[in-house]
Image (tube, rainbow, N blue to C red):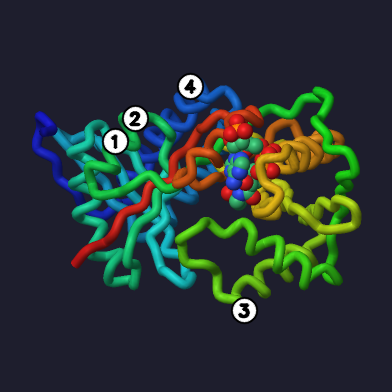
Amino acid sequence: MYREPVRVRPLRPSDVDAVCERVSTRVAAAAQRFPLLEGALDRGALRAAVASVAPAWVARSRGRVVGHLTAALLDGTRRRAWVPPDGASFDDPAVLAALLEAAAPAWRDAGARGFSVWAYDEPDEVGAWEACGACLRARRGVRALSSDDPGSVPGLGLRRAGAGDLQVALVLDRWGDPPGAPALEDDERRREVGALLEDPEVDYLIAELDGRAVAQAVVMALPARRGSRANAVHLSAVAVDPTRRGRGLGAALVEAALERARSAGYAVAEVNWRTVDPRVERFWRARGFAPTHALVEGPLAN
Ligand SMILES: CC(C)(COP(=O)(O)OP(=O)(O)OC[C@H]1O[C@@H](n2cnc3c(N)ncnc32)[C@H](O)[C@@H]1OP(=O)(O)O)[C@@H](O)C(=O)NCCC(=O)NCCS
């Protein structure tokens, strides 16, 4: 138990400076532990963001702010409260539990049925969320891009797909669905894949072997995000034909996609992967991605 009495209440304008200080310290300290993360941040933008978040909660003890919590309520098939890495801080797991107890009714009233948190991938932090009923679902890993000779598979070619590739891209995208988890509805997938194919900022890559599409990857610049490097690229939707897995196609595709990103001037790559399959975890670690963040998810029970 936390040694001191803790009081949780909605964030007030007078708390903004203290919360900004906590977020700045947290982001800078994380960059010490994870050298490929960005530790510097724009104080003015942070202040504006903290002042405008609603709802947000602060935990206070003996006149000091000892924790804060805020989430974005994103629409989707399952409405959830999303907490970014700098959306929570707590001096002790009991402070987090108190913050969550205060936030949960408001999130529920706004229609959320669960919460999803991008925390730093460290036992203390993940453990505090697990103690509040959350489970580890995914990881984010980062690696530097270097000009090492990428691995290759004879006959494997890579091409940038466009709007005319919708039908084949829908098949490839389904290969990435995690077994046993609810898949995207057909029309939702069609909308999402179609939008990616048409976006000039997105590199939708299809790998072909002897004229057949056998794998895909989607590569895009990361939108500006506190804690991420400005020159980072995001890799997603990597999927290999289920009948051809374990033969080096995934490794060759990822290396070729990262080499394209490196030649385009990116220095760092980020990827999110689901943790349910230990082979997927092994695949990304073997590609040089070191975990920085953990996605933990929990229910918002009545
Ligand atoms: C993960 C994935 C892209 C790997 O592609 P792949 O062509 O099978 O991988 P490679 O042959 O290049 O590398 C083999 C390594 O990948 C890992 N792996 C992951 N899933 C695998 C599978 N179904 N079969 C074999 N190896 C797999 C293993 O660690 C293996 O290493 P090992 O031989 O030491 O066990 C592919 O299995 C896949 O499409 N999975 C479903 C979608 C997914 O999870 N995508 C990643 C999230 S973005």
| In contact (CB < 8 Å): disc 1 and disc 3 | no
Q: Which residue is mark 1?
A: 127
The disc at residue 193 is: none
Circle 2 — which element?
Answer: helix
Residue 233 appearing in the image:
no
Q: How far apart, in angstroms, are the residues tagged by discs 1 and 2?
A: 6 Å
Residue at 18 percent across and 47 percent down: it is 98
The disc at residue 33 is: 4
Horizontal placement of 93 versus 259: left or right? left
Ligand 1 near label 3 (Cβ, under 8 Å)?
A: no
Residue 189 appearing in the image:
yes
| 1 or 3: mark nearer the eye | 3
The disc at residue 123 is: 2
Q: Residue furthest front?
A: 243
Q: Which residue is mark 3?
A: 187
Residue at 68 percent across and 53 percent down: it is 243
| In contact (CB < 8 Å): disc 3 and disc 2 | no
| 4 or 1: mark nearer the eye | 1
Q: Earlier in the sequence, mark 3 or mark 2?
A: 2
Residue 230 percent coordinates (x, y): 68, 37
Q: How far apart, in angstroms, are the residues tagged by discs 3 and 2?
A: 39 Å
Residue 276 percent coordinates (x, y): 45, 46
Q: Earlier in the sequence, mark 4 or mark 3?
A: 4
Q: Earlier in the sequence, mark 4 or mark 2?
A: 4
| In contact (CB < 8 Å): disc 1 and disc 2 | yes
Residue 233 percent coordinates (x, y): 70, 42
Q: How far apart, in angstroms, are the residues tagged by discs 4 and 1?
A: 18 Å
Residue at 26 percent across and 61 percent down: it is 300
Q: Earlier in the sequence, mark 4 or mark 1?
A: 4
